[in-house]
Image: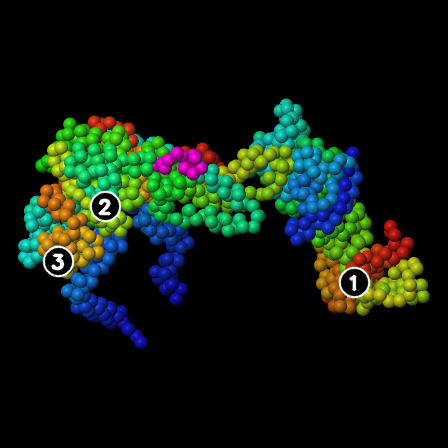
């Protein structure tokens, strides 16, 4: 059969058009980047995709799991080099950096016309907004709290969990018994340590950033670092591995009974419940209050649109996460606290005493600090400076000087 | 006195036996060549003499002293290797003197002796070079210098010439012979090259399959090979073999095959017929026009080489090579006849392939 | 007919093939490829390093000249990283060379079973850095680590040690892990090199009266010099450039005790989104590696052979 070049080209073009039209009719395919990794998180995500598929048969979602530590590297590479996903997960701490690099699409108009908006009070949106424009729909929240070993507390004759830093220190001294290999507090000194360092600094009355300027109050900050690092250096109520202990290690320490208290958020409840009996061996309590402020974070996490190729389908997907069905599905699988008030009223939360600490924290909890460069400063300056205090290479004064210096550089 | 005595040396690697009881005696100043194809065990035997390998049983004595239990360095030997084995980081001077250095000879004396050896080998201008910057022949000389300078009881050469090109090989062969005559040191030399064996040796041990096939002076090896293997291994072109019968009747013996009828001088053999193989060297086949010539055939190929002309002849079923005079005239298909000196031939048993000793007439011919 | 052929374009190509320009024409496609794959990214790295490029501050982007390099001079973390890189690379490679040598010598025998061991010994090298890192993080874990358990049982330690939490041991611990991971690379290359050394040299040395130590120094080492040089250069380059093991084990901490240049550049780019400064760090690493490789090859005089 003889086919001329012209005929061949026409035929190819027709075929391409036809196939393009067919796929447009069948389903819009969008992809979704997230950093869910554990079995329970993936189960929750799969359930949400399944529910979404039922209510939106015309849209197919392809999920892509990216390790949390590489999430920003991957997103920033996609911003620089291309290859953005349609949608992506946005956690509060990263919101400022993501909007600054232009990774998110402004969705204010769509939010205004969305019927689900009523379920989200104003503070839910604050963490997802920049200069009055909304960039993501909140889906769930991580509420800071404290896990403690109820049985250890009873053994030590402690009436209840500490409500202030002073009580916390007293409890620490009573709960520590190195001969038994038992320490009171699983301090996070490795990756992610900065979070509690900053929280303690604020609890001692030092702000971090005000109006885009470094605002650390040196005296208060030094007092805070001294108090917090002394738990390890002087009081020795913290395991000796603390300077390298990150999420995995502090959780292990608590689950294996090495530590009696650990600070984290609602996200790890399922994991701890699997190892220890809730209400008997362990319980939860609000974070203890500092001398100047009671700090606990409520970090809303949501989803944003990163590319406007299939913006309608993308909007359907990210707003679906804000609906009650999706929030409950995630709660069942992971225990992640819903952002939507409609879901918060669910019996599973109201009737469970373990969740009371979180519900209380919602009343006073703060959003995480958000300023451009927060992540870089926290991890590259706060972490090593604090670790150096723990290992005796820096005094609290020197560490605070470095933090101030680094913060000023990061904000310049 | 630096004679070498090898007594019942056996060597096995697991189930594999590579040497089956080797016995060799070599007099002081003798030149023993271990000759054989690869895998015959000659290198293993040399390594055992050097002490680089241990025998399974048996004993080695050098200069009437048993050295079987001694490490190589205490046997007072020197060795030259096929690959020369020069130390790549050392100058020629240090390479040659290294054995002395290891023995703790003072530097001044060492330098003097190295220079003497180097002058003997005409490499004294190369002393400061590294082996990488030498030609093959120069490296060979350095390797020899390294052996000479130690003034050993025994020199061991492991195929020292096989990495050289043909011309250099002849030169170095002569050099080794000259060296041997000048120094008079006892030498054991391993090679698979029969010319080296013939030219250098005072005694040749032809080896195959872990056995010494024949131990004798080169002339005996050439003229009276102990068996067909030795006969075929030595000489180029190789000895011609013709299968046939030895017929003894009425006190006279002759060898018979198609186109061949050679009288054999035998004394005291019983009458009868037996199968055997006639061995005759190409140069012993003389072209003749006589009617009653013992070997008759038809010319197959004529190859002039200059000093000789090689004539390949079909004799019955056999192909036979004769070394004819340079101006031999003859063409393919021409009939040709040869005369043979009965004293120059060898007869081998067809079964055992051993040489048949034919009475007093042949002894020490 | 003939004259037509001579005028045709193919004939001209034929004429060109007779000239010396033909070579360049044939090399052209690979040259383009090389430029795209090698030259462009390298040059782009240099260009980034003289520009401000902060993803989170797009407004600042632009030409800044040597600003990043000047900033580096007074950057405390840079100098610590530089020092740590030198320690980390030198110590890890010294250990790897030593272990690789021992392994290669042990495997270079005709003993049955060495083939199997040859494969087994390569296993660490097959593990990706990240996997090896997580595995060792567990082995050395201050609570569950098997190694701590063993050391306590044989009474070398009195209690479990948090190796990565103490600046005095963090670097050493990561070096040991790296050495474990990297030594098969040397073992493999050394083994190949050892197989290439003529047996005769050792025999000659034995006859001359040189013992095993002298044989090693005078024969083995010089004969492996080219292999050693090449292997060390390759390894230095890969060690200087790969932050993954340290990222997994310590993240550069505690303090900056295990911070190295590659990790610092990685964190600057992907944590602070400061690609300009990260680019400058990468350029400095590039220059250091070039200078190192040149000097090292000169010193070992490999190219002369």
Q: Is residue B238 magenta?
A: no
**What x and y, as percent, mark residue A159?**
18, 39
From this view, report whether residue A58 is shown above or below residue A275.
below
Q: In the picture provided, is C43 more to the left or to the right than A361?
A: right
Q: Residue at x 34, y 45 (%)?
A: C134
Read off the chain for label 1: B
Residue stretch rendered in magenta on the structure: C151-164
Q: Is residue A282 or residue B88 the one in the foreground?
A: A282
Q: Residue at x 75, y 50 (%)?
A: B212
Q: Is residue C163 magenta?
A: yes
**What x and y, as percent, mark residue B30?**
77, 40
Q: Residues within 10 Å of mark 1 (few under 14, many from 20)?
A: few
Q: Residue at x 68, y 40 (%)?
A: B50
Residue A282: give its label: 2
From this view, report whether residue A48 is shown above or below residue A376.
below
Q: Residue furthest right?
A: B250
Q: Residues within 10 Å of mark 3 (few under 14, many from 20)?
A: many
Read off the chain for label 2: A
Alpha carbons under labels 1 and 2: distance apart:
98 Å
What count of labels does the image hold? 3
List the residue tagged with mark 3.
Answer: A324
Q: Residues within 10 Å of mark 2 (few under 14, many from 20)?
A: many
List the residue tagged with mark 1.
Answer: B351
Secondary structure mostly taken by the magenta-highlighted segment of the chain? loop
Q: Are the two marked residues, 1 and 2, in contact with CB atoms closer than 8 angstroms?
A: no
Q: Secondary structure at mark 2?
A: strand
- Image quarter of residue B7: top right
Question: In this rendering, which labeled residue sits more in front, label 1 or label 2?
Answer: 2
């Amino acid at each position: 059969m003889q086919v001329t070049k012209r005929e061949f080209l026409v035929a190819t073009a027709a075929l391409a058009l036809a196939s393009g039209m067919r796929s447009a009719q069948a389903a819009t395919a969008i992809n979704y980047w997230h950093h869910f990794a554990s079995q329970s998180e993936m189960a929750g995500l799969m359930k949400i995709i399944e529910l979404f598929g039922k209510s939106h048969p015309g849209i197919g979602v392809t999920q892509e799991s990216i390790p949390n530590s590489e999430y920003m590297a991957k997103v920033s590479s996609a911003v620089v080099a291309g290859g953005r996903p349609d949608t992506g997960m946005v956690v509060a701490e990263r919101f400022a950096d993501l909007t600054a690099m232009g990774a998110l699409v402004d969705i204010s108009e769509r939010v205004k016309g969305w019927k689900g908006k009523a379920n989200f009070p104003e503070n839910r949106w604050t963490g997802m907004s920049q200069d009055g424009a909304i960039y993501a729909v909140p889906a769930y929240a991580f509420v800071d709290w404290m896990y403690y070993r109820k049985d250890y507390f009873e053994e030590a004759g402690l009436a209840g969990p500490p409500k202030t830093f002073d009580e916390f220190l007293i409890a620490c001294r009573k709960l520590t018994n190195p001969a038994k290999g038992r320490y009171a507090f699983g301090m996070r000194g490795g990756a992610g340590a900065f979070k509690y360092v900053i929280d303690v600094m604020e609890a001692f009355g030092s702000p971090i950033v005000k109006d885009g300027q470094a605002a650390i109050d040196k005296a208060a900050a030094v007092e805070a670092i001294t108090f917090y690092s002394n738990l390890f250096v002087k009081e020795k109520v913290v395991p000796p591995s603390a300077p390298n202990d990150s999420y995995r290690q502090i959780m292990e320490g608590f689950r294996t009974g090495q530590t009696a208290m650990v600070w984290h958020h609602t996200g790890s409840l399922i994991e701890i419940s699997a190892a220890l009996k809730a209400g008997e061996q362990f319980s939860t309590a609000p974070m203890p209050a500092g001398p100047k402020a009671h700090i606990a974070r409520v970090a809303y996490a949501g989803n944003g649109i990163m590319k406007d190729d299939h913006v309608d389908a993308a909007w359907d997907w990210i707003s679906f996460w804000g609906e009650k069905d999706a929030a409950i599905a995630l709660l069942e699988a992971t225990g992640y606290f819903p952002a939507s008030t409609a879901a918060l009223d669910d019996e599973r939360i109201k009737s469970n005493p373990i969740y009371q600490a979180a519900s209380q924290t919602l009343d006073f909890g703060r959003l995480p600090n958000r300023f451009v460069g927060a992540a870089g400063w926290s991890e590259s300056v706060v972490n090593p400076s604090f670790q150096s205090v723990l290992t005796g290479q820096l005094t609290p004064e020197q560490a605070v000087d470095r933090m101030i210096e680094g913060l000023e550089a990061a904000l310049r | 006195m630096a004679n070498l005595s090898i007594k019942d040396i056996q060597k096995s690697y697991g189930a594999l036996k590579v040497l089956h009881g080797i016995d060799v005696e070599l007099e002081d100043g003798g030149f023993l060549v271990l000759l054989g194809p690869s895998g015959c065990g000659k290198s293993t035997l040399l390594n055992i003499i050097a002490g680089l390998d241990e025998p399974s049983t048996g004993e080695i004595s050098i200069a009437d002293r048993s050295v079987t239990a001694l490490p190589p360095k205490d046997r007072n030997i020197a060795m030259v290797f096929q690959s020369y084995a020069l130390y790549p980081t050392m100058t020629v001077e240090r390479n040659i003197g290294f054995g002395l250095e290891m023995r703790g000879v003072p530097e001044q004396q060492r330098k003097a002796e190295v220079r003497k050896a180097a002058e003997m080998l005409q490499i004294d201008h190369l002393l400061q070079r590294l082996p990488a910057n030498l030609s093959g022949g120069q490296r060979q000389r350095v390797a020899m210098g390294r052996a000479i300078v130690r003034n050993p009881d025994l020199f061991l050469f492991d195929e020292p010439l096989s990495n050289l090109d043909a011309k250099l090989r002849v030169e170095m062969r002569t050099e080794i012979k000259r060296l041997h005559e000048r120094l008079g040191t006892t030498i054991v030399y391993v090679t698979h090259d029969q010319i080296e064996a013939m030219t250098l040796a005072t005694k040749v041990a032809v080896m195959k399959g872990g056995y010494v096939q024949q131990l004798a002076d080169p002339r005996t090896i050439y003229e009276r090979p102990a068996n067909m293997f030795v006969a075929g291994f030595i000489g180029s072109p190789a000895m011609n073999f013709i299968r046939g019968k030895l017929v003894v009747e009425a006190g006279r013996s002759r060898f018979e095959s198609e186109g061949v009828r050679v009288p054999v001088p035998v004394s005291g053999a019983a009458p009868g017929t037996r199968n055997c193989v006639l061995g005759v060297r190409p140069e012993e086949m003389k072209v003749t026009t006589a009617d009653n010539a013992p070997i008759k055939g038809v010319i197959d190929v004529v190859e002039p080489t200059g000093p000789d002309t090689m004539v390949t002849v079909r004799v019955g079923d056999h192909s036979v090579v004769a070394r004819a005079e340079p101006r031999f005239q003859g063409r393919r298909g021409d009939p040709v006849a040869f005369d043979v000196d009965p004293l120059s031939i060898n007869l081998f048993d067809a079964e055992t392939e051993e040489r048949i000793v034919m009475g007093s007439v042949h002894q020490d011919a | 007919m003939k004259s037509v052929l001579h005028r045709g374009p193919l004939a001209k190509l034929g004429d060109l093939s007779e000239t010396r320009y033909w070579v360049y024409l044939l090399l052209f496609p690979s040259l383009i490829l090389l430029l795209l794959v090698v030259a462009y990214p390298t040059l782009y790295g240099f260009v980034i390093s003289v520009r401000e490029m902060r993803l989170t501050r797009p407004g600042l982007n632009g030409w800044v000249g040597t600003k990043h390099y000047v900033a580096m001079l007074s950057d405390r973390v840079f100098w610590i990283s530089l020092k740590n890189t030198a320690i980390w690379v030198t110590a890890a490679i010294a250990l790897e060379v030593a272990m690789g040598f021992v392994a290669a010598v042990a495997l270079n025998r005709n003993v049955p079973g060495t083939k199997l061991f040859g494969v087994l010994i390569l296993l660490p090298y097959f593990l990706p850095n990240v996997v090896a890192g997580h595995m060792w993080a567990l082995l050395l874990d201050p609570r569950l680590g098997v190694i701590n358990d063993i050391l306590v049982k044989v009474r070398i330690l009195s209690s479990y040690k948090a190796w990565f939490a103490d600046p005095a041991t963090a670097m050493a611990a990561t070096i040991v892990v790296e050495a474990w991971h990297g030594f098969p690379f040397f073992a493999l290359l050394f083994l190949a090199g050892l197989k290439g050394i003529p047996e005769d040299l050792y025999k000659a040395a034995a006859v001359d009266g040189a013992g095993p130590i002298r044989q090693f120094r005078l024969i083995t080492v010089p004969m492996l010099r080219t292999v050693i040089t090449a292997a060390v250069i390759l390894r230095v380059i890969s060690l200087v450039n790969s932050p993954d093991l340290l990222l997994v084990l310590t993240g550069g901490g505690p303090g900056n005790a295990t911070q190295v240049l590659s990790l610092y550049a990685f964190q600057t780019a992907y944590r602070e989104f400061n690609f300009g400064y990260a680019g400058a760090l990468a350029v400095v690493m590039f220059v250091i590696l070039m200078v190192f490789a040149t000097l090292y090859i000169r010193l070992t005089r490999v190219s002369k052979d």
